Image (cartoon, coloured by chain):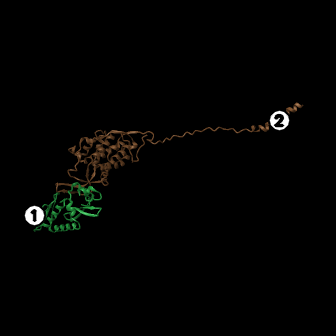
Amino acid sequence: MDDLIFKDELNRPELTVVPLNNKHEISLLRAFEIDTKTQKKYMRNVVFMIQNEFITDNMADSVLLKEELILFEKGDEQNTFFQLKSRKIKESHILSLSLTLDSGKTIYISKSQARAIVSLWNMAMMGYSFARILEFETQQTIQSWTQALYENYLLELENK
Amino acid sequence: MIELYFVLLVLALIIVIKLTFFRHKIVPEPEIVEEKEVIVIPKREHNIKVGSYCKVRYSYYLPSNFKSYQAKELYTNIIVANLWIKEPFHTVFTSILKFLEENNDCIKSESTSTIKIKIAKTNESANAYKVYSIRELIFTTVADVYKQIKDEYSAEDAQIILLAILLFNIDLLRSMSSLFDDIDSINCADIFLDKFDNSKKVLYVIKQIRQGTKQFNFINIIFQNSKKFATEFPYEDSQTSQKNLLTLSNYVPNIKKNLINSDEFYVTSSVQKVFF
């Protein structure tokens, strides 16, 4: 995507946001490459975002995060993103996945929320081929991300 | 007797010949008046346009010294239009314009959301948001305030207020922190006013604007309103985007005056005076 931004005006990456969970503001950011000559749309990157913060920045990490959500209580301390924690609410022990953000806030995800997120992920991926994203996934820089976010109006105050 | 007849006959003949041949001499001929050539001297036009016959040159700074369009426009509409080339105001005003051009900085926009970007491979992280350029905000406030001030205040007072507006938000530049331990708008402004006579008055006006007194509070309002139409740029606060620190030689720009006719500047405002 780095090359795409500065290559051509007609071949800009298009970023779209899919909200996965409204309570914790979890969303999925997909970067598309639009080929105007062949009029085709290719997925080039998938990123998890929680409350305006990037959790992953490439496809491999995003798939890993999704798998941790699927495993839920079967996962252990080897998890990279989520950690299994037992909490006591109304005198009953509850298992939930926890994640601490850079802002210091911790979020807890229940089992049903995890299932909902995974099913929405599957819906968001429907209809797109993975050939492009696996073959041509390039490393991106902070500058290229900001430029792409700015051009797709994701830095506006409304798209919080 | 015959001699008498002969004389009479001759006389009669002479009379007849005179009457027949020289009749036209009796009729008085009309006098021929010689027509004199009247030389019409054309009146000289007194309303000669200034600069068409005698080009007056003043010592201005070259317009090519300014990079940005806004600074060039401010220079022509304020200094060239009013002929405020009296020192030390002329050099102080242009040196601040030049300083703001070269050492521009940005402040966070009021209508932006921040997104934290992380790169896993290089372990980098930065906040991305939109910014305004400080130079643009200050220049638009100067242009807007000048329209209100020019009729209300005298030339000296207007000059003092314009210098105060250029300097009252100069502590927003992050590079100024390298010069001072405590960043204060008055400390920062004091550097630029070494050569200016009425520097105390300028500093007094800056204090008044900062306190938001009744007389000068409209400048704060105009500064806030200038953000509405200012252009926004994407920005990330990573280490690579940080600018070089300010050096002491930077705030004394090295530019010289040249003798230029004022027609070379295209003054857009209608307040241009005739200097004759």
Three-letter amino acid code at disc 1?
A: Asp
Binning the other alpha carbons within 10 Å of mark 1 as few (below 14), some (14 to 19) or many (20 upward) gives few
Binning the other alpha carbons within 10 Å of mark 2 as few (below 14), some (14 to 19) or many (20 upward) gives few
Residue occupying the far right of the picture: B1
- Per the model, the C-alpha gap separating discs 2 and 1 is 168 Å
Q: Nearer the viewer, residue B214 or A130?
A: A130
Which residue is denoted by mark 1 in the rendering? A76
Q: Nearer the viewer, residue B204 or A45?
A: A45
In this rendering, the label closer to the viewer, 2 or 1: 2
Residue at image coords 42%, 41%: B275
- Measured as percent of width and height from the top left, residue A90 is found at 11, 68
Chain letter of the residue beneath label 2 in the structure image: B
Query: Label for residue B13?
Result: 2
Q: As drawn, is B54 to the left or to the right of A100?
A: right
Chain letter of the residue beneath label 1 in the structure image: A
Please tell me the colour of chain B.
brown
- Measured as percent of width and height from the top left, residue B164 is found at 30, 45
* SS at badge 2: helix
**Which quadrant, please, contains the C terminus of chain A?**
bottom left
- Measured as percent of width and height from the top left, residue A49 is found at 20, 61
Contact flag, marks 2 and 1 (Cβ < 8 Å): no
Q: Is residue B213 visible?
A: no
Q: Is residue B129 visible?
A: yes
**Which quadrant, please, contains the N terminus of chain A?**
bottom left
Query: Which image quadrant for residue A56?
Result: bottom left
| Chain identifier matching the green colour in the rendered picture | A
Query: Which image quadrant for residue B26?
Result: top right
Residue at image coords 89%, 31%: B2
Three-letter amino acid code at disc 2?
A: Leu
* SS at badge 1: loop
Query: Label for residue B1?
Result: none
Q: Do the dots labelled 2 and 1 sit on one chain?
A: no
